[in-house]
Image: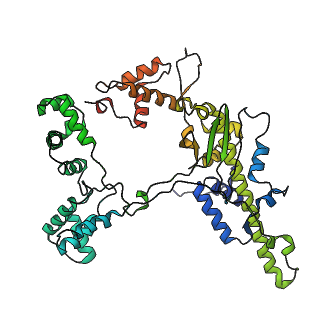
Amino acid sequence: MGVKETLQQALVQRQQQTLSPVQVMFVKMLEMSGPEIEENVRRELDENPALEEVDDVSEHERDPNNETAEQMQRADYTDDDLPAYRLEARNHSVNDVYHEPIAVAGQNLADYLMEQLGHGNETAETMEIAPFIIGNLDSNGYMRESLDKIATDIAITTGIEYDPRALETAYCAIRRLDPAGIGARDLRDCLLLQLRRLPSSPSVNLAIDILERHYDAYIARHYDKLTTALGVDRQALAAANDVIRSLNPKPAAAFDTGGDNDLARVIIPDFSVEAEGNHLELTLLNKIPELRISASFDDDSLPSSTASNSYQNIYITQQRNQADTYIKMLRMRRETLFKVMSAIVQLQRPFFLTGDESRIKPMILKDIGNVTGFDLSVISRAIREKYVATGGSIYPLKFFFNEGVATDSDAADEESASAHRIMAEIKKAVEAEDPQHPLSDLALTKMINDAGINVARRTVSKYRERLLIPKSNLRRKI
């Protein structure tokens, strides 16, 4: 039986939203971090001759059609329907003196180790092999690769096959270098390398015995088992524990291992919020220079419309239009960021006044959208990799967004508790607990419930882990 083919035509209606090139530009600029937008502005200044920095700020301010960022923000945020506290924008120009922290890279670990080997009595073969072994140390100074694999890599790279005993000799020589613990296979090995260099004493000897024979019990903090197994009292165990805790688990952490991820990260805040009594002052820390269209690209600079000048006219017009669009997008970005941060300050006013993280209220993107009128996607991009300095600390804007957890319905305020309040309660309880009898998650849950926050034990466990607080058995002190 044959198959009958038919051709049908159907009309389907779809709704699709597309972004214009200008909107795409704005979205990309909005989600850029502070350093990224600064680099973007510098690159645009280099590539577009129609753009230039405004050198004379006073002249710029006199132009009524070209308001500064501060003038725009003061005009936007002086309405009567704003909160009673003060919001001011003090945009720093590119010429302002701004002191920011500087990340200084330490001495290179590989050079430091090779320098020590050079002062010893190592053989030429050891000096040849050592750089390959040192190159396999991780950022903490640990040796994670096997010597067999390193030998294979050397043979592939150089064509030289070294005797395994030569690699072992070079590896042992590196483990004798400073900082103590370098070249360790794991944490236990690292601590033992350091202990064996210390002058002999009852506490040091006991510490070595603990790590060599009772490491698992020590890590689990089974102190009763340790005192019984070692035949010592709590005081001696505590002295040995103090010795172990004085050791450095990351011997290479202070060195520059050559990778960007190992250098100190510097976070430059985008905003600052300062409390003065019952008032709050919001500052947009804007290091982006004010831009304008160069006078050589204004309408008067266009040559007469002749065939020979047509291409020149098109070029001037294109560059000028691109510059004008870029300036507008940069201004929109600045205004959007300020409005979003103003809404955060408005909704989290108790925290910014006191610095008490337990005062942070439940807040989601929709709450900011209700205040600003912005789409949730715009708000999400606006808070990406943005930071605020307040009360001596720097917080990512995402820190202030958290779901609420229902409180006891009998509570007087009948509001929801934020995750920050629950975590504050956990921290307070753990700090006040008996170190020899730490609180279990069940006990923490009961205490928080008694405080009027109705949460489940699994919720308490989740927030305890988020705070990097170990389980109760791992918090037990001697």
Question: Where is residue 271 shown, x and y percent of the image?
Answer: 62, 46
Question: Where is residue 349 shown, x and y percent of the image?
Answer: 63, 33
The image shows a total of numbered marks equal to 0
Q: Of 410 and 335, which appears nearest the observer?
A: 335
The relative height of residue 405 versus residue 167 in the rendered view (above or below) is: above
> What residue sits 46% from the left and 31% below the top?
423
Q: Quadrant of the C terminus?
A: top left
> What residue sits 84% from the left and 75% below the top?
301
Residue farthest along the bottom direction in this orientation = 308
Question: Where is residue 369 shown, x and y percent of the image?
Answer: 67, 39
Residue 114, by quadrant, is: bottom left
Residue farthest along the top direction in this orientation = 410
> What residue sits 73% from the left and 67% below the top?
52
Side (left or right) of 208 relative to 252: left
Side (left or right) of 465 relative to 272: left
Q: Of 415 and 356, which appears nearest the observer?
A: 356
The relative height of residue 418 versus residue 33 in the rendered view (above or below) is: above
Q: Would residue 375 be visible to someone looking at this image? A: no
Question: Where is residue 386 shown, x and y percent of the image?
Answer: 58, 48
The relative height of residue 81 versus residue 147 in the rendered view (above or below) is: above
Task: Give the colouring mode of the picture.
Answer: rainbow
> What residue sits 63% from the left and 41% below the top?
273
